[in-house]
Image (cartoon, rainbow, N blue to C red):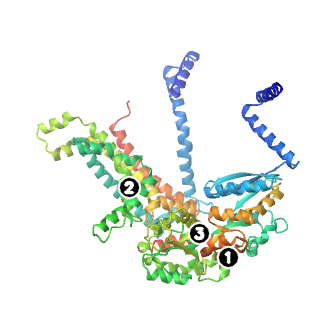
Amino acid sequence: MKGKNLLVGLIMLVLVLSGCGNNAGNNSANSSVNSGEAAAAAGNAVEPTELSFYFTGSLNVKSMWEKIVPMFEAQNKNITVKLVHIPSGQGGQSTMDRLIAAKKAGETSVDIDLYEASGSDVLLGEAEGIFETVGIDTIPNISKIEASYMTDLNNLAVPYRASSVVLAYNSDTVSTPPQTADDLYEWIRSHPGRFAYNDPATGGAGSSFVVTALYNFLPDEAVHSQDPAIMEQWKQGFDLLKELGPYMYQEGVYPKKNQGTLDILATGEVDIIPAWSDMALEQLNKGLLPENIKLTQIEPAFTGGPAMLAIPAMSVKKEAAQTFIDFVLTQEAQETIVNEMFGYPGIKWSEMPAELQSKFESVAKGYRQFQIGELGTEITKRWQAEVAAQ
Amino acid sequence: MNLDKAGALRMKTSTAKSGLSRQTKDSITGLLMVFPSFLLLVFIVILPISLAVRESLLDPNGALSLANYKYLFTDKAMKNNIIFTLNLTVVSTVITLILGYILAIYLRFSKGRISEWIRKLYFIPMFIPAVIATYGIINMYGNHGWLARIVLALGGDSFPRFIYDYNGLLLANLWFNIPFTAMLLSSALAGIPNSLIESARDVGAGKLNLFTKFIVPMTYKTVLVAATFSFMGIIGSFTAPFLIGPNAPQVLGIAMQQSFSIYHDVGIASAMAVFMFLLCSAMGYFYIRSMVKEEPAGR
């Protein structure tokens, strides 16, 4: 008993002394790292690899990763993931700039081991050669992803979740929602003032309505073209939008932001709007949208897009990053993503549990990916000049 | 803090270098005290403005040109935006001043219980953030808002459109600017001694005469100040126009944000900023000139 007390006292003394040697803040950090290492050494006899994972997005993205990372770390004792969240609108671009700058400066390594990339990031990364190629050999679960998605990205990034624009409608007043784009335009004409899409400059849902209206008149390949010559062919689509203008909410009011149209759908001012699937599902789930609001996808579908994970080629911890991505593509992690983000899974629906499949049935028809780059800006500009100001 | 430092400095210099005259020392101290705010001005105001002016004079290839300004005044949509903004700003400022003046005069000369309550409550809008106020306006005046529902319940069949319209912006501008204007004018009116007004009445001045010969001349400078502040606040407004403004034409602030962060057209956005800056500095110029005229620098 007395000996034990003495031992505790000694340990305390040692701690205090070491605390005197260092400054106090450092000391506590050191000791926790030491104990962590000790535990790892006892368990696997390997030092854990720390992955720096840079991602951007709203708070829901952050809380999703905060759920997934502990699940991953519990299964992979030798890897820890350091989450670096860059809130959207606060320089998500800077991470790409850092990667490019590091490459141009001729450095050999970079402390960004994993990056959540957008479509334009992947295009840019491809031009600059900063992302590592990914494939089934290093990440077996990629086999669960629709093969064409991977080839669209030139195997430079892994789409791990997606969301798309869908139609949200009031099922009390709309018993049979439009099934095709032409049905929808016809419905708008026969129900003046009951449809609204948001100003495309302020949100993706309205932008998707505009872009699909233009490109439905064009051949399928056009959606992957960034050739400015294609702008000539937009006229028919813009004429359609202008013609639909007087049938819109308040004879041509386009609310601001994706939330703007959801608000007037909730108050019953309109009956159908285009909306982001994840936003609408989340608000339905939280009761912000009334229960009579239903979602559906039309044919040809609205646009949508994946969120992707990419591994910087200069990272020195590629293997750990690959292990992490492989985990993100497991059914277990994908379920968390779908439930947390109300998004689509990155892997095929057939790989998901049946219960989730039926829950998302109405919107799971898929989406179209547009890769029109800078042309999107041109569309918004012309929409502002021709449709808004008509 | 700064004062202490300056004081200490003065003591030090006066003991160390007795060669300098007192006046020189004072002016050195003065300069040192002005220096921090001067630096702040340089980096926060002067430098960004000159960068914006430079940016607005460059075409996409980096050559000097007036193309951005030409676009600003010839493009049909842009011309409409400018006319819309100026119209809204001038109309809002004038109505703000009229209503603010009436309110201030009422508060100055009325002693009833109602005016007591108004005096306590009228500046509340100043303490409500713009976003919250704007959502309040949407809830109140929206197509399905409170007022529309009340009108409908009382048997009315239509309600004028406020949200996504010029009317709504006018309403929001009045809401945001009347309290401050009334507050400025109230303090100016409070400066008119009661004895003056009473003696004017004694010699037979009517209400109209009292107003035009005494109250207006004694407060017009404050009116000018209030006009300047309202004008600048309204022309640069963003939150309300962004949330409840029409899609087209747009207020310049919105058009500028769109050019800058959606079209990535820095040149045109800068040209708009410079144009707005010139408008505001014109207002500022008249304001400062009248101030200087009235109070020759002698204090």
Q: Which residue is mark 3?
A: A277
Q: Which residue is mark 1?
A: A225
Spatial separation of the CA atoms under disc 3 and disc 1: 26 Å
Is residue A11 left or right of B120 when viewed as pictured? right
Q: Nearer the viewer, residue B13 or B91?
A: B91
Is residue B188 left or right of A351 when viewed as pictured? left
- Image-quadrant location for residue B88: bottom left
Secondary element at image label 1: loop
Of labels 3 and 1, the one closer to you? 3
Q: Quadrant of the C terminus of chain B?
A: top left
The amino acid marked with disc number 3 is Ser
Using the image, name the chain to which the residue with label 2 belongs.
B
Q: Which mark is residue B173?
A: 2
Spot the residue most to the front: A1
The reply to whether discs 1 and 2 touch (Cβ–Cβ < 8 Å) is: no
Q: Number of callouts in the render?
A: 3
Q: Is residue A26 above or below residue A300?
A: above
Of labels 3 and 2, the one closer to you? 3
Spatial separation of the CA atoms under disc 1 and disc 2: 45 Å
Using the image, name the chain to which the residue with label 3 belongs.
A
Spatial separation of the CA atoms under disc 3 and disc 2: 36 Å
- Image-quadrant location for residue B19: top right
Q: Position of residue B169 (x, y in %)?
A: 39, 60
The amino acid marked with disc number 1 is Ser
